[in-house]
Image (spheres, helix red, strand yellow):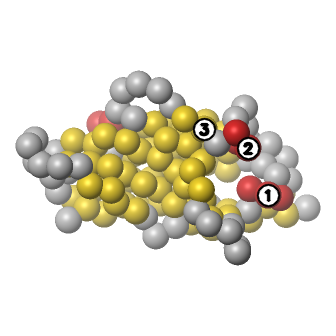
Amino acid sequence: QVQVVESGGGLVQVGGSLRLSCAASGSIFSVDDMGWYRQAPGKERELVAVLPKSGWTKYADSVKGRFSISRDNAKNTVYLQMNSLKFEDTAVYYCNVVCRAFESSPAFSHWGQGTQVTVSS
């Protein structure tokens, strides 16, 4: 089993910053993609940023230049630094980890329970 736990959400003023963390643990041989998604009330879950083990990083257009994703492979941890926060960034933020239990096993996607980010005036 794989556990994915987010932390770092909270209430912040417009223009402020927050840093989210997400740690994956359990039966993990290797981690492929690590990313962040968010879901605002009444809206569908959307990609915020994804960072593969090697290669390109992808950001939603709405967060480019303001958010930065990074990872610590030794700790199976991914971070999301959010700067210049806007009202529309208010959402539940979910961490997604794609990983393998064994060298030859397929990769599976695992989600955290989410952490609330609220941006206020």
Q: Is residue 8 visible?
A: no
Pointer 2: what residue?
62
Residue at horizontal 8 percent and vertical 43 percent from the top: 104
First-in-chain label (3 vs 1): 3
Quadrant of the image for the N terminus?
bottom left
Quadrant of the image for the C terminus?
bottom right
Badge number at residue 59:
3
Q: Is residue 69 left or right of residue 89?
A: left
The one of 69 and 72 positioned closer to us in this rendering? 69
Q: Are marks 2 and 1 in contact (CB under 8 Å)?
A: yes
Q: Amino acid at mark 1?
A: Glu
Q: Element at badge 3?
A: strand
First-in-chain label (2 vs 1): 2
| Residue 34 falls in image quadrant | top left
Q: Amino acid at mark 3?
A: Tyr
Residue at mark 3 to residue at mark 2: CA–CA distance: 8 Å
Residue at horizontal 78 percent and vertical 49 percent from the top: 85
Residue at horizontal 10 percent and vertical 41 percent from the top: 103
Q: Residue 108: image x %, image y %? A: 26, 55
Q: Residue 3: image x %, image y %? A: 30, 63
Q: Is residue 100 visible?
A: yes
The one of 77 and 102 positioned closer to us in this rendering? 102
